[in-house]
Image: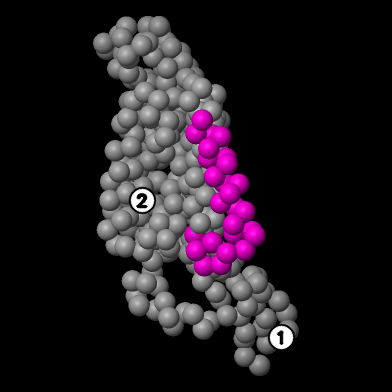
Amino acid sequence: MSTVAHPRVTATSTGRTSRPVWAVLARAESRHLVRHPAFVVGAAAMSAILILTTVAGVDFSALALSGLACLPLAVGTFVAANLASRRDVRSGTEELLCPLPTTAVVRTAAQLVAVAAAALVAVAAVGLTVTVLTALDGPEVRFAGGIEQRLPSVAELAQGPVAVAALGLAGIAVGRLVPIPLVAPVLAGVLVFSVWPEGQLRWFAPVVNPALTVPGGYWPHPEIAPRTELLGFDVTSLGWHLLYLAGLGGLAAGLALARHRLTPATAGLPAVALAATAVGAVLQLR
């Protein structure tokens, strides 16, 4: 008896049920994602930033751990996930895949789940750096001219991995909804420079610097204090920023799935995610 695939289960010739098809596809998509050149380059850049800022010591290591170091990986994940979502279109096999029992919505779901592999890479890199810095009596930041040890909060450490996941999901949504080759590179360039806005506008970037300085100041630049004197970190707003990022990721995932099949579930996910995005967007500006 031949093997018959189903979107939910795979029945073998022995009559036993194996893993769901989406789980098998997600595992394969995870391997493709973390091996993609864009992802590898982003991971290498992230590692370099974490290593260099760890050696640099005061101020910079805390800034990198709060999410800045993960931005290259987030952009690389966005590009790799976007290309994966357009693989069937680019290869001209979209029509050949239609008759298969594994539907387009299942393939998209597998790609969305595979983004978790990229987020785990970010978690591992940040966690290892924190462990090393803690063993070296750091990270250290300058407060009012003095140097203090300060381990970033959970919200700060989580910002990088959450941004990686959100941008990965966004890459898939863009690929499914706007399958145009030039869209992803343009958006990737925008994401690279999105870290630079100051003031309230910076909270809408994927990665935000939560440092609080004297009015008009910028951190870290202690050599021109007191204009750049570090007053603290806005961890509360950063927590709402995480909700904003998670909402954007959920919205992207919901839209990518709804593109293939509109059901109460695929319609409900974008609605809930949009509400979470709106709440986070407003409250992060408190």
Residue placed under numbered mark 1 in the picture: 14
Q: Residue furthest right?
A: 15
**Residue furthest to the bottom:** 1
Q: In the rendered view, does 189 fall on the left or right side of 102?
A: left
x, y percent for residue 4: 62, 84
Instruction: Tell me which residue sits at (38%, 46%) in the image.
Output: 73
Which of the image's four quarters has the N terminus?
bottom right
Q: Which residue occupies the foreground of this view, 153 or 109?
A: 109
Q: Secondary structure at mark 2?
A: helix
- Residue type at mark 1 is Thr
The structure residue drawn at horizontal position 45% and vertical position 45%, both measured from the top left corner, is 164
Q: Which residue is mark 2?
A: 76
Neighbour class for label 2 at 10 Å: few (<14), some, many (≥20)?
many
| Residue 80 sits in quarter | bottom left
The mark total stands at 2
Q: Amino acid at mark 2?
A: Gly
Magenta highlight range: 256-282
Q: Main secondary structure of the magenta part?
A: helix
Residue 183 locus on image (x, y percent): 31, 56
| Viewer-closest of 23 and 267 | 267
Mark 1 surroundings within 10 Å by alpha-carbon count, few (fewer than 14), some (14 through 19), many (20 or more):
few
| Image coordinates for residue 91, horizontal then vertical, percent | 34, 75
Q: Residue at x 35, y 77 (%)?
A: 92
Residue 207 x, y percent position in the rendering: 41, 35
Nearer the observer: mark 2 or 1; the answer is: 2
Q: Is residue 271 magenta?
A: yes
